[in-house]
Image (cartoon, helix red, strand yellow):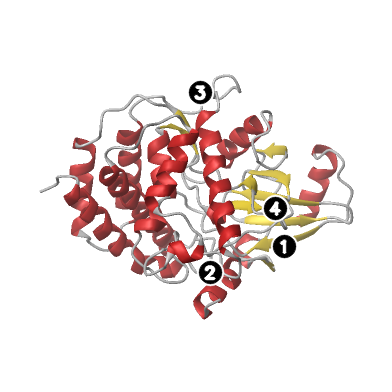
Amino acid sequence: MTAETEDRQEMFSGTKEVADTHKFDEAKLAAYMESHVDGYKGPLEVRQFKGGQSNPTYQLITPGHRYVMRRKPPGKLLPSAHAVDREYKVITALGKVNFPVPRTYCLCEDESITGTMFYIMDMMEGRILWDPLLPGLDPATRGKMYESLCDVMARLHMVDYEAIGLGDFGKPGNYFERQISRWSKQYIASQTETIPEMDKLMEWLPANVPTYSSTSIVHGDYRMDNTVLHPTEPRVIAVLDWELSTLGHPLGDFTYSMLQWVMPDLGTGAGVASFANSDLKALGIPSLEDYIKMYCERTNRSGIDNLDFYFSFNFFKLAGILQGIVGRVRDGTASSAHAEQQAARVRPLAEAAWKHALKAGAK
């Protein structure tokens, strides 16, 4: 395990004292849980998870059970961001068809309890691994973990969303156009410097969307560190962080989960880590081509066209996400102590997005 890997695992794993900017009246929360969380028995101890750049996430500890609370951050927020009510809706619906998500208990829209909207779910006991190279594991185990990661994403994209009550969870058409518009607006609202590639991408991407018809539930930020792995077995037992989920194109979602295969190395703390300069075969991690084949076999596809457009779109989207974090630092609402580091990563992501746009035919 490298020092950088140790830094990343230490940086994002576990809990800490609740940050001053995210404190609330814990007695009010305990009283609320008494009447709204089935089986709750205090006393209550509250800790804050280190990981997560967006919605403050807390561990709620009682003598007999551990829960997780996700809440909107306090302060000035971008429109449509931090939609914990949407997270609650999709997790609750997917739980009904035994998709690997935590059990949900309640959504509280009464801001007098903690100051912002929140929901409570089970704490899943397992491993969250922040380095996608999975140091310390043997090659066979790494391979099985990536197979499980792919299996779960394929399962998500095959769920009949209308049958589980999510027919109104998003608009079934124009997914890329809507996403490009959303992240363009977020980027502009959060902008702190001029990045020419972002300006070119905001013009090129919406004019070059491939023709498509597929619609599925999309997670929006699917990667190894947004899942909980079984404590000892190489399999995913829960998918977390559904803030960006909607109805959309499954290939937009899948190719986002593949960014680490083509990601420039942005160092510790980046939103998505990189496989750059790694011998994936020796590590037991599937190649880009093998991972695509794995997904296509599970979703009855013959292959994936327009990869460079999808990679360009997703690097652009990630640049927009990180710029939003930079904007929240500027506005004093960022949830992570490491959020300021993201500013230096927006430009290289924009450059990577434009590189793939050029491969896809941009001039």
Name the disc covering residue 230, or none.
4
In the image, residue 2 above or below residue 118 = below
Q: CA distance from mark 2 to mark 1?
A: 15 Å
Q: Amino acid at mark 1?
A: Arg
Mark 1 crowd level (few <14, some 14–19, many ≥20, 10 Å Cα): some
- The mark closer to the camera, 1 or 4, is 4
Query: In the picture, residue 93 is in which quadrant?
Result: top right
For the question of whether residue 115 can be seen, the reply is: no
Q: Residue tagged by mark 1? A: 47
Residue 82 in the image: state x and y as whole percent: 52, 46
Q: Residue tagged by mark 3? A: 168
Which of the two labelled residues, at mark 1 and mark 4, occupies the earlier sequence position? Answer: 1
Quadrant (top left/top right/bottom left/bottom right) for the N terminus: bottom right
SS for callout 2? loop
Instruction: Please report the residue visible at 41 percent of the width from the left and 63 percent of the height from the top.
Output: 275
Q: CA distance from mark 1 to mark 3?
A: 35 Å
Instruction: Please report the residue visible at 33 percent of the width from the left and 28 percent of the height from the top.
Output: 174
Mark 3 crowd level (few <14, some 14–19, many ≥20, 10 Å Cα): few
Q: Residue tagged by mark 2? A: 337
Q: CA distance from mark 3 to mark 2?
A: 36 Å
As drawn, the residue found furthest toward the left would be 363
Which of the two labelled residues, at mark 3 and mark 2, occupies the earlier sequence position? Answer: 3
Q: Is residue 60 left or right of residue 193?
A: right
Q: CA distance from mark 1 to mark 4?
A: 22 Å
Which of the two labelled residues, at mark 2 and mark 1, occupies the earlier sequence position? Answer: 1
